[in-house]
Image: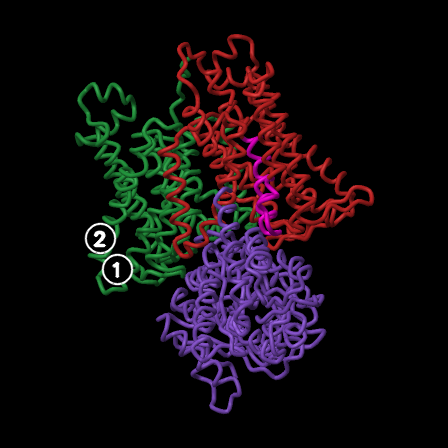
Chain colours: A purple, B green, C red
């Protein structure tokens, strides 16, 4: 406690000095950096989402500053590690708003963390771009809350449409304990009847589980099942896929955009062949035809990320990229960091091309993506390919 | 029906063998020092992750594996030297917190040294499933069960026939008496940490080709291993193995026949039930209490 | 008069009350108030847990479970079913006390590491139920919670919450101190030294152990309910094994068998992660190292170790009583 007291009085002293200096040099105020606040799950169970998000934000804040900043001001990134915990996220969001006094917040790796923070940003009236997946974040629409990733509902829809085209009508679900898994499973269960699909089995596995053969055996022995859908992310789906192969199950397996990465193929091994999932075009960046309007954005991001960090690009990093760029775009349109103006500018963004797809925000739609932003991909020859 | 049962049984044995190895690690350290080493799970993680990075660097398994195990053993020795020994005489709770602090430290270190992604190891002898009585088992699972069996036999030889092993057993029965017989108790403690770390690392390496590994993988495995050790009776080697296998099989049977959502909860309920009727676990020593 | 001030009950309580009253002078924005409130809530849990661990000599690695039950109970009754928050909190606390009573008796027959495992298992089971029954509990993403209100008065805003939590902390500490000084407290300390010995002098060990278990569960549940209303949100993140460990660490770090130690422990370990953010990637390593270091260098905890420094050397030390009373 003592050191926080000492720190805060020291900071106040510094601030007083700085303010006095600013008074004496009129133009000094204009050089004040634009503060972008972020709370991400850089460690913890969803670290492999939060880590690329954090790296992407750092990389692009650097690049933008090197190119002169935004509106003549440098960007300053203040990022905290919430480790996937909603309580920590809430405290750090409060710190960003009250102590660090940021201009905009881009963050919230998981839905739980995002939802915990929403009352704060609504109360503080600061624009917040979330990087989490569940549809409840933007439905009902909240004035100050936006998001960049596709919703889990869109993923279900995309998958069901594909299943319809393959005449699959009886499916089994197998999902994990995470918020993402449960949320997507719930959305799929709301929608399946609409697409004429019946769910004949519904299994789950635990967080640190190392083997899903028991659940898959149950599914295999269920009468009439034609395909399996695994809404999940992390190592769970990779193990499910491996076990799928081990048990010799041949029916189609659908994964979610939660495992849209090259990593997944490496982890699941040969069993990944034939797996389908909906994903952003980022995953097949090099395979996009030159005429594809998304190609330049995704290829450029992919190359930047991979050359800097020497690891495969991730769609989650792509969401952070979109979030940052949208915020920057909105600030440019608003001509400054006035929170209300930036928010209005964000809402007015049309036809913006991000790694996730074309973004058309509106007063009713704070995500801006439609189903065309999702591509259906399949693993062929150990690589992601577009399903025509 | 019986093909299903066979599948659950085989999977349960595989998972159970891993729990057994981790539980053995707990028991060995507990015997030497009455300390529950909550960092045991991290040794499992270190074994797997170290092998991943060593083989990614080009080393063949024959080299990478012993090196990884040695690295884990070194970490175990360092843990004893720098965290446990300076706290000699601290209360039981304080020691629990020290080992938990160590586990947090090691996880943080792993994040920095390696990364936060998941990694796969290539299976020792390939990927083609083997069919047994209508169920399938991966060749790697056979490795897991086989190596665990070999280790259990080796340990019983070690504790029963070698001088060091007997010294360790003596220390676990009565520390003071062992000291009076001239046994270097501090050395016993030192070695037990190294040995447990090696066991954990081997478990981690065996299971990584089946279940993937990451900086986080030690938490749950450590917890389950501890549960297995308690189930079998703390300090009992036989108990650790039986406890581990029982826990693994209980888990897969619950997942298969009862509810896959609650399989972990069921496992803990079983443990609680056993403890209610046998407060020292299945094979634990029923100690008297001194007034 | 000075003699009375020196006693933990009056002197210590006055000091704590003074600290709580004067602290806002140093809290310059809502974020600092937020941390102070979190410290207070953790401290309430720790004061109760300290009775169990420090005085009765038991251990619980599952207290986050009771905290979580309190939080979710209030959240579900108040938000999903529209109960008045006070009634929800009261009912939840009763339910948790009942659970602790029913489960406590068989669990507390175990000793040492077996008891640790049983409480750990209990905590994990509670966590699993909360995470799986998502229709009630919202699953891993949790549910939002209505603000705390009594009649028409709504408790909102960091400053108001600070005073409420501060006052409740004082009450909790006062209750704990009273319990310790009472015959029940002495019975607990006798239990700690030797259960068999205590039984020989006529103390019913099982009854006393269950009683203190229930009391500590009630403290935790109340703190949980308050935390739910304050955050406006509950997730299973607070019901984990790691959080149970954090609570035990706070108690041990502050000093077992020291009620004020529990408060100090909660204060330090709640604010520590905020201070460690400067370490970025190394934060976890530093935190783990701090845990190890404090147990090695301050094995009796902060408050008792400091108390020893300030205590004049005593010619006839009255024995365990003095040491345990702080």
What's the magenta bit mostly, secondary-structure-wise?
Answer: helix
Q: Residues within 10 Å of mark 2 (few under 14, many from 20)?
A: some
Q: Are labels 1 and 2 assigned to the same chain?
A: yes
Q: Residue at x 54, y 76 (%)?
A: A325
> Mark 2 — residue?
B67
Looking at the image, do the residues carrying marks 1 and 2 touch, with CB atoms under 8 Å apart?
yes
Observer-nearest residue: B3 or A330? Answer: A330
Q: Secondary structure at mark 2?
A: helix
Q: Position of residue C3 (x, y in %)?
A: 55, 16
Observer-nearest residue: A38 or A289? Answer: A38
Q: Is residue B108 magenta?
A: no
Res. A61 visible in picture: yes
Q: Secondary structure at mark 1?
A: helix
Residue C300, above or below C22: above
Q: Is residue C31 magenta?
A: yes
Q: CA distance from mark 1 to mark 2?
A: 8 Å
As drawn, is B84 to the left or to the right of C56?
Answer: left
Q: Earlier in the sequence, mark 1 or mark 2?
A: 1
Q: How many marks?
A: 2
Q: Which residues are magenta?
A: C23-49
Q: Position of residue C240 (x, y in %)?
A: 53, 44
> Mark 1 — residue?
B54
Q: Residues within 10 Å of mark 1 (few under 14, many from 20)?
A: some
Observer-nearest residue: A252 or C212? Answer: C212
């Amino acid at each position: 406690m003592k050191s926080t007291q000492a720190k805060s009085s020291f900071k106040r002293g510094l601030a007083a000095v700085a303010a006095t200096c600013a008074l004496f040099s009129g133009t000094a105020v204009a050089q004040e950096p634009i503060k972008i606040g972020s709370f991400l799950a850089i460690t913890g169970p969803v670290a492999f989402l939060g880590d690329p998000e954090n790296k992407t934000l750092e990389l692009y804040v650097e690049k933008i500053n090197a190119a002169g900043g935004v509106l003549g001001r440098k960007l300053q990134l203040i990022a905290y590690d919430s480790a996937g915990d909603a309580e920590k996220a809430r405290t750090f969001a409060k710190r960003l708003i009250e102590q660090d006094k940021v201009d905009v917040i881009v963050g919230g790796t998981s839905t739980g963390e995002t939802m915990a923070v929403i009352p704060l940003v609504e109360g503080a009236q600061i624009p917040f771009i979330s990087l989490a997946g569940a549809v409840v974040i933007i439905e009902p629409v909240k004035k100050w809350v936006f998001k960049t990733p596709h919703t889990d509902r869109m993923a279900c829809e995309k998958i069901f449409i594909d299943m319809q085209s393959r005449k699959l009508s009886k499916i089994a679900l197998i999902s994990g304990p995470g918020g993402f898994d449960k949320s997507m499973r719930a959305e799929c269960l709301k929608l399946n009847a609409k697409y004429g699909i019946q769910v004949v089995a519904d299994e789950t596995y635990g967080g640190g589980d190392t083997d899903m053969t028991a659940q898959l055996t149950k599914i295999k022995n269920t009468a009439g099942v034609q395909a399996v859908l695994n809404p999940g992310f992390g190592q769970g789906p990779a193990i499910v896929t491996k076990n799928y192969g081990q048990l010799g199950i041949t029916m189609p397996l659908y994964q979610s955009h939660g495992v849209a990465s090259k990593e997944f193929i490496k982890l699941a091994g040969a069993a990944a062949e034939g797996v389908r999932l909906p994903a952003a075009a980022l995953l097949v960046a090099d395979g996009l035809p030159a005429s594809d309007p998304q190609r330049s954005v995704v290829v450029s991001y992919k190359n930047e990320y991979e050359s800097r960090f020497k690891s495969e690009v991730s769609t989650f990093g792509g969401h952070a990229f979109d979030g940052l760029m949208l915020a920057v775009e909105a600030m440019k349109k608003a001509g400054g960091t006035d929170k209300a103006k930036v928010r209005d500018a964000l809402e007015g963004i049309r036809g913006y091309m991000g790694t996730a797809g074309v973004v058309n925000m509106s007063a009713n739609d704070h995500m801006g993506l439609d189903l065309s932003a999702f591509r259906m991909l399949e693993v062929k020859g150990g690589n992601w390919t577009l399903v025509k | 029906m019986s093909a299903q049962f066979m599948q659950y049984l085989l999977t349960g044995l595989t998972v159970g063998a891993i729990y057994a190895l981790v539980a053995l690690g707990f028991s060995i350290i507990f015997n030497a020092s009455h300390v529950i080493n909550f960092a045991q799970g991290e040794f499992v993680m270190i074994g797997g992750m170290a092998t991943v990075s060593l083989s990614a660097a080009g080393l063949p398994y024959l080299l990478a594996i012993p090196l990884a195990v040695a690295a884990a053993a070194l970490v175990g020795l360092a843990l004893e030297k720098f965290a446990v020994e300076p706290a000699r005489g601290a209360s039981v709770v304080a020691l629990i917190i020290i080992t938990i602090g160590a586990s947090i430290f090691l996880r943080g270190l792993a994040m920095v040294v390696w990364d936060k992604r998941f990694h796969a190891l290539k299976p020792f002898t390939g990927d083609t499933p083997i069919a047994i009585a209508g169920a399938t088992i991966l060749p790697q699972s056979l490795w897991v069960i086989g190596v665990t069996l070999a280790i259990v036999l080796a340990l019983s030889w070690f504790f029963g026939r070698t001088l060091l092993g007997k010294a360790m057993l003596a220390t676990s029965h009565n520390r003071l008496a062992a000291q009076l017989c001239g046994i270097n108790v501090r050395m016993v403690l030192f070695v037990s940490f190294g040995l447990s770390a090696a066991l954990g690392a081997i478990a981690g390496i065996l299971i990584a080709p089946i279940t993937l590994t990451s900086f986080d993988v030690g938490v749950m495995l450590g917890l389950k291993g501890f549960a297995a050790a308690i189930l079998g009776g703390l300090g009992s080697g036989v108990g650790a193995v039986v406890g581990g296998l029982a826990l693994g099989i209980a888990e897969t049977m619950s997942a298969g026949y009862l509810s896959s959502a609650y399989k972990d909860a069921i496992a803990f309920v079983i443990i609680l039930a056993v403890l209610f009727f046998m407060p020292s676990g299945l094979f634990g020593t029923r100690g008297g209490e001194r007034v | 008069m000075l003699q009375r001030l020196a006693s933990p009950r009056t002197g210590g309580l006055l000091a704590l009350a003074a600290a709580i009253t004067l602290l806002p002078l140093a809290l310059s924005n809502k974020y600092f108030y937020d941390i102070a409130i979190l410290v207070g809530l953790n401290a309430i849990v720790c004061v109760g847990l300290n009775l169990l661990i420090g005085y009765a000599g038991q251990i619980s690695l599952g207290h986050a479970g009771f905290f979580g039950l309190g939080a979710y109970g209030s959240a579900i009754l108040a938000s999903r079913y529209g109960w008045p928050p006070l009634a929800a909190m009261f009912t939840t606390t009763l339910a948790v006390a009942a659970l602790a009573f029913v489960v406590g008796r068989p669990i507390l027959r175990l000793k040492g590491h077996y008891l640790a495992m049983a409480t750990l298992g209990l905590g994990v089971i509670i966590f699993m139920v909360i995470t799986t029954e998502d229709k009630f509990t919202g699953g891993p993403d949790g549910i939002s919670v209505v603000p705390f209100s009594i009649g028409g008065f709504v408790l909102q805003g960091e400053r108001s919450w600070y005073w409420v939590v501060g006052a409740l902390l004082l009450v909790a500490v006062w209750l704990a101190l009273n319990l310790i000084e009472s015959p029940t407290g002495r019975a607990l300390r006798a239990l700690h030294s030797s259960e068999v010995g205590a039984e020989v002098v006529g103390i019913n060990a099982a009854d006393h152990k269950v009683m203190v278990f229930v009391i500590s569960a009630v403290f935790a549940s109340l703190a949980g309910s308050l935390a739910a209303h304050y955050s406006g949100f509950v997730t299973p993140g607070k019901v984990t094994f790691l959080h149970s460990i954090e609570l035990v660490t706070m108690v041990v770090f502050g000093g077992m068998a020291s009620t004020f130690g529990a408060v100090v422990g909660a204060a330090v370990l709640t604010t520590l992660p905020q201070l460690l953010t400067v370490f970025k990637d190394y934060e976890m390593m530093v935190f783990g190292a701090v845990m190890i270091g404090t147990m090695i260098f301050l094995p009796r905890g902060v408050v008792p170790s400091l108390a020893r420094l300030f205590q004049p050397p005593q010619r006839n030390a009255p024995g365990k009583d003095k040491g345990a009373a702080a």
